[in-house]
Amino acid sequence: MTSDDWYDSGLDLEAAAPDQAVAAYRQALELDPVHSDAHLNLGRLLHEDGRVDEAESHYREAADADPESARAFYNLGVALEDQGLRPGAVEAYETALRLDGELAVAHFNLSRLFEEDGQGRGALRHLAAYKRLIERGGVGA
């Protein structure tokens, strides 16, 4: 099987057998270490399993493999935030938004972080962007 075949297998297995999906994504990465989507999906499954530091590593690999992937940077931001690494999370969310300004969830997360840090102007700007995108039916991520 090719790396894409293993990736597709992982997709098929995620809902019913997440451990097998993890194994499939790892197999895809054995064959193609820069398979961005395999890194993203493996990272997400690891993240959901509480293995945030491993997830972060895969999100970084995904971003390195596809530096235009807003989703990779958004997921990296979530992982960094979950580890209490707020400056890195802000940077990752901002990068995600530079790549895709309509990624509503990144605006929401930045708004929340800026509000918590006492940066009212930035918080309001991102909250307004989030609301505008939601009203248009967007969410992103």
Image: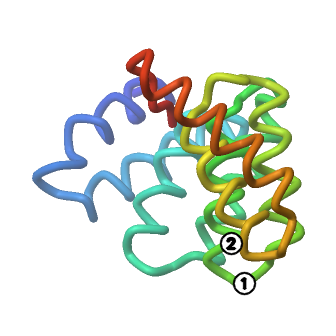
Identify the secondary structure beneath mark 1.
loop
> What colour scheme governs how the chains and residues are painted in the rendered image of this protein?
rainbow
Of residues 43 and 7, the one nearer the viewer is 43
Residue name at image x 75 percent, y 54 percent: 123
Residue name at image x 45 percent, y 23 percent: 138
Q: Do the residues bearing badges 2 and 1 touch, measured as CB atoms within 8 Å? A: yes
Residue name at image x 81 percent, y 60 percent: 120
Of residues 111 and 14, the one nearer the viewer is 111
Mark 2 Cα shell of 10 Å, populated few (<14), some (14-19), many (≥20): some
Q: Which mark is residue 81?
A: 2
Which corner quadrant of the image does residue 37 belong to?
A: top right
Of residues 96 and 115, the one nearer the viewer is 115
* Screen quadrant of the N terminus: top left
- The answer to whether 17 is drawn above or below residue 14 in the figure is below
- The image shows residue 29 at horizontal and vertical percentages of 59, 44
Query: Relative to residue 119, is residue 4 drawn left or right?
Result: left
Q: Amino acid at mark 1?
A: Gly
- The answer to whether 69 is drawn above or below residue 10 in the figure is above
Residue linked to disc 1: 84
Which corner quadrant of the image does residue 100 belong to?
A: top right
Q: How many marks?
A: 2
Identify the secondary structure beneath mark 2.
helix
- The answer to whether 72 is drawn above or below residue 91 in the figure is above
- The image shows residue 15 at horizontal and vertical percentages of 16, 49
Q: Amino acid at mark 2?
A: Glu
